[in-house]
């Protein structure tokens, strides 16, 4: 049974295998199952049996072919390539045009290109595209024609140059006026645009005129119209200069472009003698900037006598001094009655010597002169030949006495009694010396002989004794041991007798003792020799009267004393001492001080401590109500120009402003805090009538010395002048524009009598403080002074030479000393202080002399008062001034009320 079953299964599987092979060989391939793109299958049979092949052709517009085989009902590629679009090649370029593919990305069947014309050209063809067909590109290549512009005609007095009849894109037509007296109103050239229109209208010929241009950083009258050959008047902001030349109105516009060029000064390469310049490496400087030039030894800044200096770049673009160093030299001297010396060189270097010659009848004041940093020293002068009054020892001049005698004068001299030759005559020679000058010699009876060997504890110490000694002759002595000379060490012959030296015994000093003096420390010696120094100590609460003491013949000098420690009267700014005033106060004394109105902390107390200083000393500071806050951002046509504002400003503090465009500061550019209120600057519009024009070339013996003249000058503007030869400026060297008029400088002849000599050493409580005095000073020259201790200058610290006379400075007492004297007067008039302590509160009452007051302050020369005015000012109150343009303060901008009078600042030229 099992065996028969296995046989049956095997027969079943064999039969199934045979039937499957037969079915596979009989499976067909269908036409509809061919999936290759762009092929033609319409001509194929619907079915193919296993092993059959077919050839596939490409669809119209495509290239390639395929061969397929039917394998078990599936199409298999056995040869050929797939169908792709047929290429058409390049479609062709058109002159003055371009194309782009609008369909497909290659030049193949079905692609489209579209043509466009470049600017200035238009499409002449009806069709502007081409398509890639089976046979290639269809249509012709499009054509682009140039754009034409309208004909230009009927020009009248306008001449046109160019293709006016058939102008094409890009053609240019140039226009001119037929008349030389006319100008074009419109463009000189127009061109044919891409849209077939002219770039501008055809110009007309009109009368020649120019309009004022917009000038960056410049000002001009924008409402004015200029005709042919008129000059444009314009000015520039500060820091800028008009371009060189005068813009003239022409038919072509302004002859040169009106421009404002930034003012700069150029610093060239360092010259010989220049050690360094600062800032290092900078060689272009704006107006108002400085360069520091430092010269080496034997050199100084050109035109000065300084070895280093800050040199300013001026508003005209020139250095105020040439920024170079030159070797210090002197020219061969010239002057009144001095002769030229053709055999001598003209220029001398520093330290070189020479001599000079004088006219006949005159003589030199110096045998030789030396070239120094201050010129020739001594000053080379020629004075008329005279003879000085003869100095004759032991004799006298007879007759009328003079200090000098003219040439050829004969005078008589007489020797004193006992001297020879008695009376004799001398004559003043042409060389300034006395002819036949004699000496008065001692007669034989008035000579000295044989000086003592030992006298006055002195022993003769001269081994070479003479037989006799003339008047004034001497012999050397020495003191015995333990002695020293009281005065000189010589015996001197006088009127036939010896005057011997005096020797005295050495003096010593013991370490000082006395009231409140402490014993000497262990390391100090007890005995001191003559001339030795030491110091000493005092008991607690006392102080020395001298830093050191010296042992002298009269004991210790200065006398060693110990005095009780005291405190000096306290000095307090913006405050005063209450009660009885003293110069000194004893230790532990307590006094009251009071701050002025508006200052804090009001009344406070201080105590004199054991060091001679005041405990609890305070400063009087401005109260918060007198401080200024929040300055206006815009006021009086001025705009705040200070980015770093403070929370508040003290008295005299300031904030910078700038004027609106077209406005100028009337005075200063700062808002100033005064008594808790702001004093603001004022900006004004400067009218054309207040400007100055055409400064005189020559006036008041002064000649204009400024080559870069402006069309006009604003208020305060200046022009440089120079004096004619031999003349000097009386005041400044500039003509200054003021209210539309020029204030010119004045040149004067400075005679020898208008020079100043020999300034006083001490005058008006001032002491001369200038060591390098000159032989004479020109007009305006000055000598420095200093005030005596405790005083201060009222107006300036220099004596100034004016018209041959010195104007000396004045020293006055300081405000504190003045008040101290006033308070002393008050005490003499029954000043009193009541101090009552009740419930921890102190009540102070005092009767003090009335303080002096000042009336309204006056205007100062070249300056303007900035502070608000009132009828009266208290002692110590101040007002502020502002210097006008080209001037600056010499000693600060504040005037102070002191002793009932104003102490004013001074404005000097920059």
Image (spheres, rainbow, N blue to C red):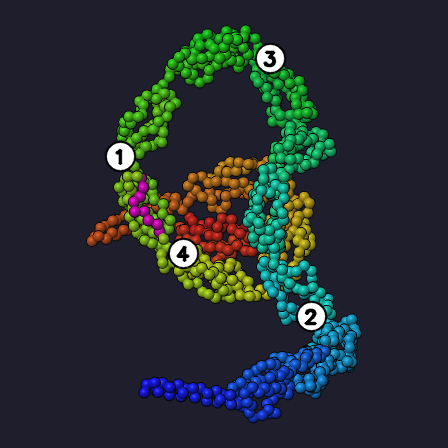
* Residue 56 occupies quadrant: bottom right
What is the distance, in whole Å, between disc 2 and disc 4 at their CAs? 55 Å
At 60% from the left and 83% from the top, the residue drawn is: 66
Q: First in sequence: mark 3 or mark 4? A: 3
Instruction: Say whether marks 1 and 4 touch (CB < 8 Å).
Output: no
SS type, badge 1: loop
Q: Is 619 included in the stretch rendered in magenta?
A: yes
Q: Which residue is mark 3?
A: 420
Q: CA–CA distance between discs 3 and 4?
A: 85 Å
- Closer to the eye: label 2 or 1: 2
Instruction: Where is residue 664? Give x, y as percent.
Output: 55, 62
Is 489 inside the magenta-drawn segment?
no
Label 3 packing within 10 angstroms: few (<14), some (14-19), many (20+) = some
* Marks 3 and 1, how far apart at CA: 73 Å
In the image, residue 408 sits, relative to residue 87, either above or below, namely above
Q: Which residue is mark 4?
A: 650
Above or below, comparing residue 669 to residue 815 in the picture: below
**Upstream in the sequence, badge 1 or badge 4?**
1
- For the magenta stretch, what is the residue range? 612-620
Q: Nearer the viewer, mark 3 or mark 1?
A: 1
Residue 231 falls left or right of residue 600: right
**Classed neighbour count for the residue bearing mark 1: other residues with Cα under 10 Å, few (<14), some (14–19), many (≥20):** few
Using the rendered view, name the quadrant where residue 297 is placed.
top right
Q: Earlier in the sequence, mark 3 or mark 1?
A: 3
Q: Which mark is residue 540?
A: 1
């Amino acid at each position: 049974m099992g065996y028969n079953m296995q046989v049956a299964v095997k027969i079943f599987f064999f039969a199934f295998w045979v039937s499957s092979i037969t079915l596979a060989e009989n499976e067909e391939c269908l036409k509809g199952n061919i999936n290759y793109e762009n092929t033609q299958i319409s001509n194929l049979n619907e079915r193919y049996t296993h092993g059959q092949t077919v050839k596939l052709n490409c669809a119209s517009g495509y290239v390639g072919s395929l061969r397929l085989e039917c394998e078990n009902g599936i199409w298999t590629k056995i040869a050929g390539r797939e169908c792709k679009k047929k290429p058409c090649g390049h479609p062709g370029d058109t002159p003055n045009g371009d194309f782009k593919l609008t369909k497909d990305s290659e030049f193949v069947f079905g692609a489209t290109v579209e043509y466009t014309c470049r600017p200035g050209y238009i499409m002449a063809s009806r069709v502007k595209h081409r398509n890639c067909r089976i046979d290639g590109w269809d249509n012709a290549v499009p054509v682009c024609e140039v754009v034409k512009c309208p004909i230009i005609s009927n020009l009248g007095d306008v001449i046109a140059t160019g293709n006016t009849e058939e102008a094409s894109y890009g053609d240019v037509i140039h226009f001119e006026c037929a008349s030389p007296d006319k100008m074009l109103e419109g463009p000189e050239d127009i061109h044919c645009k891409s849209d077939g229109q002219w770039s501008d209208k055809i110009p007309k010929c009109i009368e020649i005129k120019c309009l004022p241009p917009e000038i960056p950083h410049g000002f001009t009258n924008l409402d004015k119209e200029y005709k042919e050959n008129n000059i444009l008047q314009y000015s520039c902001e500060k820091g800028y200069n008009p371009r060189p030349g005068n813009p003239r109105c022409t038919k072509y516009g302004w002859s040169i472009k009106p421009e404002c060029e930034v003012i700069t000064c150029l610093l060239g390469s360092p010259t010989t003698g220049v050690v360094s310049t600062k800032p290092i490496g900078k060689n272009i400087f704006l107006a108002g900037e400085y360069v520091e030039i430092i010269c080496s030894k034997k050199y100084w800044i050109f035109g000065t006598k300084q070895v280093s200096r800050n040199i300013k770049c001026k508003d005209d673009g020139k250095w105020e001094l040439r920024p170079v160093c030159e070797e210090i030299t002197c020219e061969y001297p010239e002057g009144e009655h001095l002769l030229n010396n053709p055999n001598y060189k003209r220029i001398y270097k520093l330290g070189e010597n020479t001599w000079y010659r004088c006219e006949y009848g005159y003589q030199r004041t110096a045998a030789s002169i030396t070239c120094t940093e201050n010129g020739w020293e001594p000053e080379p002068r020629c004075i008329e030949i005279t003879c000085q009054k003869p100095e004759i020892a032991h004799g006298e001049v007879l007759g009328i006495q003079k200090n000098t005698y003219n040439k050829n004068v004969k005078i008589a001299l007489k020797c004193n009694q006992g001297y020879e030759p008695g009376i004799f005559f001398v004559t003043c020679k042409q060389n300034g010396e006395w002819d036949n000058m004699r000496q008065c010699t001692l007669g034989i009876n008035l000579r000295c002989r044989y000086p003592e060997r030992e006298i006055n504890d002195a022993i003769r110490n001269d081994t070479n004794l003479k037989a006799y000694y003339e008047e004034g002759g001497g012999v050397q002595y020495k003191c015995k041991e333990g002695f020293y000379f009281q005065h000189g060490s010589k015996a001197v012959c006088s009127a036939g007798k010896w005057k011997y030296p005096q020797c005295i015994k050495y003096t010593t000093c013991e370490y000082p003792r006395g009231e409140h003096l402490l014993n000497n420390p262990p390391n100090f010696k007890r005995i001191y020799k003559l001339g030795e120094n030491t110091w000493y100590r005092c008991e607690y609460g006392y102080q020395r009267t001298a830093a050191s003491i010296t042992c002298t013949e009269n004991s210790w000098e200065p006398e060693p004393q110990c005095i009780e420690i005291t405190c000096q009267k306290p000095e307090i700014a913006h405050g005063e001492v209450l009660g009885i005033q003293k110069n000194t106060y004893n230790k532990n004394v307590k006094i009251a001080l009071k701050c002025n109105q508006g200052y804090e902390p009001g009344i406070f107390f201080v105590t004199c401590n054991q060091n001679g200083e005041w405990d609890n000393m305070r400063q009087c500071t401005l109260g918060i109500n007198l401080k200024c806050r929040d300055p206006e951002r815009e006021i009086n046509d001025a705009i705040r120009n200070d980015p770093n504002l403070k929370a508040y400003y003290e008295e005299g503090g300031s904030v910078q402003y700038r004027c609106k465009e077209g406005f100028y500061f009337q005075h200063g550019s700062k808002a100033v805090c005064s008594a808790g209120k702001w004093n603001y600057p004022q900006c004004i519009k400067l009218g054309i009538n207040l400007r100055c024009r055409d400064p005189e070339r020559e006036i008041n013996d002064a000649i204009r010395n400024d080559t870069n003249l402006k069309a006009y000058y604003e208020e305060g503007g200046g022009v440089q002048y120079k004096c004619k030869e031999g003349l000097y400026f009386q005041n400044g060297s500039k003509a200054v524009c003021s209210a539309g008029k020029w204030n010119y400088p004045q040149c004067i002849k400075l005679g020898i009598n208008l020079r100043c000599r020999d300034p006083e050493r001490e005058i008006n409580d001032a002491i001369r403080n200038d060591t390098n005095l000159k032989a004479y000073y020109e007009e305006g020259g000055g000598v420095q002074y200093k005030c005596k201790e405790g005083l201060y200058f009222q107006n300036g610290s220099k004596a100034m030479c004016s018209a041959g006379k010195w104007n000396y400075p004045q020293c006055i007492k300081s405000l504190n000393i003045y008040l101290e004297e006033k308070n002393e007067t008050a005490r003499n008039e029954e000043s009193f202080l009541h101090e009552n302590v009740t419930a921890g509160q102190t009540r102070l009452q005092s009767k003090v002399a009335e303080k002096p007051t000042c009336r309204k302050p006056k205007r100062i020369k070249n300056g303007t008062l900035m502070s608000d005015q009132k009828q009266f000012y208290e002692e110590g109150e101040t007002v502020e001034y502002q210097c006008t343009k080209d001037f600056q303060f010499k000693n600060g901008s504040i005037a102070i009320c002191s002793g009932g009078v104003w102490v004013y600042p001074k404005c000097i030229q920059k």
